[in-house]
Amino acid sequence: MAVEVSVIATSSLGDRSYLASDGQVAIVVDPQRDIDRVLYLAGEKGVRITHVVETHVHNDYVSGGLELARVTGARYLVAAADEVGFARVPVSDGDVVPVSDPVRLRVIATPGHTFHHLSYVLDEATGGGWQPAGVFTGGSLLFGTTGRTDLLGSRHAHDLAHRQHASARRLADLLPDGAQVWPTHGFGSFCSASQADAPDSTIGREKAKNPVLRLAADQFVTETLADLDAYPAYYAHMGVANTAGPAPVDLTPVSRADAGELRERMAAGQWVVDLRHRKAYAASHLAGTVSLGLDGPMSTWLGWLVDWGTPITLLADTPEQVADAQRELVRIGIDRPAAQATGGVEQWAAEPGQLRELSMADFPALAAARAGNTPAGLPVADVVLDVRMTNEWKAGHVEGAVHIPLPDLPKRLADLPPGTVWVHCGSGYRATAAASLLTNAGRRAVVIDDMFGRGEAVGLEIVTEA
């Protein structure tokens, strides 16, 4: 293949961007907002970025396309049908974009994820003409699934699902089985109807595996819409930012806060987020903080939980961890944290009484507690709270548990019965975030830091919902 396609993964948001190069010039597809990663990769390969393309106006992150095009002088390709507040090269179905002598792009309208969604076929010159190497599919045809169709409002979901089906079929008919599929979503992003079932794929594989290419339109629409779960609240702000034209990012260090300022910020209702691993948080943390460790999808859950615009202060062991968190947050439009603090937890407390611990257990301990044999050192499990998403709950949950998805918890604390709350998710990450919210509200909580699959194995009754 004359063109090398490199993946730029953003695992925290479940997305991929791409840099496609012929060794001299490069195309960048759906770049994230922190474009220094892209510039570094292009420099490493010794190529000049001449084209930046967007498959659609993104709903799950702020795009870096406009700034990347400005910095590099590249042509910025955006759907002509999308009304945007900046200059770009408008492209439409059927357009052919020359990139270099051996490379071109063909624009294919693939509505479904959005109304004006585009896919880009990457063609290579051969002795006999042009040969499609693959297709950048954005939120259209994904690995074993498709992009969800309800992000523009539930009233459009049914119509867009039908269009998604037709678009996927169109790609399958236009391209040979050996053509690579390069999607943006599907790797953990809430923009996909379900998650990728493979690390890479081709048109031929998708014909064999993907429901959109195996089911009739009506059946695909019914099944797709039935399986959609909630998506992050901050998505409401992403499309607006991307349509207006995102500003450049500022990743310089934010101001440092001492113990007194941290206390004042929490007293004012601001969020102070502890980025350390949940076990470190449980061992000792500053009262009033929220646990969202950098080892998990911190930005997704923080952006979903916090009231948009609320000042956020970050706590971490090191300045490098704060910098990593800043990078994650600018991708969803939280541009500048209010403050930061690093070092030992003792430095964050104005007085010893501000430090507290959080009890942790596992599913065997819960099974014992429900059998009347609560392990020593742990309180009785008055309430079992499941903070997983609705689809997870329906697939199987602990009998008698209360279900409140983590994003709903801040506004539904009053729905919990009285007593000590043992809270779980699928692994412990969301449960620790929930427990921090519960204790901040005056409830006693125990984190079940364990994989949910162990529950049934240790004797807990697991029930499902149709």
Image: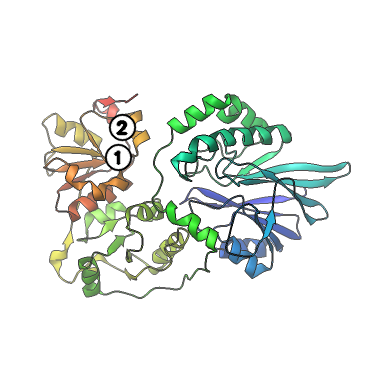
Location of residue 45 with respect to 180 vertically, above or below = below
Mark 2, Cα crowd under 10 Å, few <14 / some 14-19 / many 20+, is some
The residue carrying mark 2 is 454
Name the residue rendered at 21%, 71% in the picture.
Answer: 264
Q: Which mark is residue 421?
A: none
Q: Is residue 403 visible?
A: yes
Quick one: 460 or 326, which is closer to the camera? 326
Location of residue 396 with respect to 13 vertically, above or below = above
Q: Quadrant of the C terminus?
A: top left
Residue 370 horizontal/vertical position (percent):
15, 31
The three-letter amino acid code for the residue at tag 2 is Arg
Q: Quadrant of residue 320?
A: bottom left
Q: Quadrant of residue 63?
A: bottom right
The colour scheme applied to this rendered structure is rainbow
Contact, CB < 8 Å: mark 1 with mark 2? yes
Q: Which mark is residue 450?
A: 1
Q: Is residue 175 visible?
A: no
Name the residue rendered at 60%, 42% in the picture.
Answer: 111
Residue 358 horizontal/vertical position (percent):
20, 52
Residue 89 horizontal/vertical position (percent):
69, 59
Side of 439 relative to 183 (left or right): left
